[in-house]
């Protein structure tokens, strides 16, 4: 039986790309979108790890993406693609260090990528995350909307949105195994801890985690600096650690 198109599966919905900072890019049917750093691209990425013309997203009977012989590749759900690849609701697309989720749900039903309190409310009690932490984060408003689940956005995605928005503070992550943190100051990652690991090793370990809750405690107080890699290089190292 032929696969139903996204239009039939989500009648009345308009597909969109969702970014970790809450950005929503509406996609029109019957169009192709080129993603990359080039100023002539349809979706321009402020991302040194993306190529000038990195990937092409096609919105037709089906939605699919093709890599345009980019330097660092295009990934769908953490797998590097070699040919045009169909996408579904919730597909995770990585172009350079820029990550988006595809939503074909009706407007207002974007919980698949909501980084605010909706995502937190959907955490199940069987997730292994401490229930007291879940309750306190749901009730806490100091995270400024930057809070959610790791199964929607991983560490690379979160850092990308945080750094591009110029926000700083302590990114807390509650894991089944305990608590981790990342210190971000003035557009750079200064320190991290995850279990017994510290610095870059802690970041790599945290990037591989799939289950957890994150939230931002904003602030610019001084902290020890154990990580000195430039932002672009750091995101590249973390992306490579996931391959």
Image (spheres, rainbow, N blue to C red):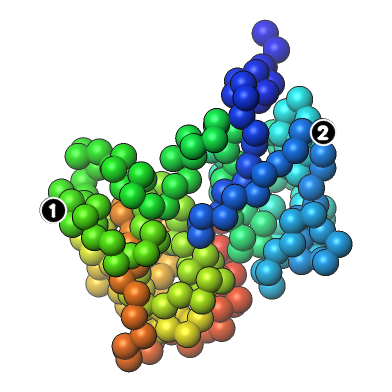
Question: In the image, what residue occupies the spot 44% across and 40% down?
Answer: 111
Across and down, in percent, residue 33 comes to: 79, 47
Q: Secondary structure at mark 2?
A: loop
Question: In the image, what residue occupies the spot 31% across and 39% down?
Answer: 122
- Please state if 77 lies on the left or on the right of 168 as rendered: right
- Please state if 102 lies on the left or on the right of 29 as rendered: left
Occupied quadrant, residue 87: top right
Neighbour tally class for label 1: few under 14, some 14-19, many 20 plus, Cα within 10 Å? few
Question: In the image, what residue occupies the spot 34% across and 80% down?
Answer: 219
Query: In the picture, which quadrant includes the C terminus?
Result: bottom right
Across and down, in percent, residue 15 comes to: 64, 36
Residue sticking out furthest to the left: 132
Across and down, in percent, residue 161 comes to: 52, 65
The residue closer to the viewer here, 223 or 194, is 223
Q: Is residue 169 above or below residue 10?
A: below
Across and down, in percent, residue 120 comes to: 31, 47
Q: Which mark is residue 30?
A: 2
* 2 or 1: mark nearer the eye: 2
Residue sticking out furthest to the top: 1
Q: Which mark is residue 123?
A: none
Occupied quadrant, residue 66: top right
> How many badges with numbers are in the image?
2
Q: Is residue 164 visible?
A: yes
Q: Is residue 156 visible?
A: no
Residue that label 1 marks = 132
Query: In the picture, which quadrant includes the N terminus?
Result: top right
């Amino acid at each position: 039986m032929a696969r139903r198109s996204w239009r039939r599966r989500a009648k009345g919905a308009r597909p969109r790309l969702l970014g970790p900072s809450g950005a929503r890019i509406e996609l029109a049917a019957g169009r192709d979108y080129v993603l990359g750093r080039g100023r002539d691209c349809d979706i321009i990425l402020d991302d040194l790890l993306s190529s000038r013309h990195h990937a092409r997203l096609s919105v037709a009977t089906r939605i699919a993406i093709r890599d345009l012989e980019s330097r660092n590749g295009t990934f769908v759900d953490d797998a590097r693609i070699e040919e045009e690849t169909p996408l579904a609701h919730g597909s995770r697309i990585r172009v350079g260090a820029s990550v988006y989720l595809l939503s074909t749900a009706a407007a207002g039903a974007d919980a698949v990528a909501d980084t605010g309190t909706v995502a937190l409310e959907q955490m199940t009690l069987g997730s292994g995350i401490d229930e007291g932490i879940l309750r306190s984060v749901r009730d806490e408003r100091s995270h400024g909307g930057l809070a959610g689940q790791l199964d929607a956005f991983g560490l690379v995605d979160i850092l990308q949105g945080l750094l591009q928005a110029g926000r700083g503070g302590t990114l807390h992550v509650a894991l089944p195994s305990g608590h981790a943190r990342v210190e971000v100051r003035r557009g750079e990652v200064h320190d991290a801890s995850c279990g017994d690991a510290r610095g870059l090793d802690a970041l790599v370990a945290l990037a591989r985690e799939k289950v957890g809750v994150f939230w931002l405690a904003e602030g610019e107080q001084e902290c020890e600096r154990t990580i000195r890699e430039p932002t672009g290089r750091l995101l590249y190292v973390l992306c490579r650690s996931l391959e």
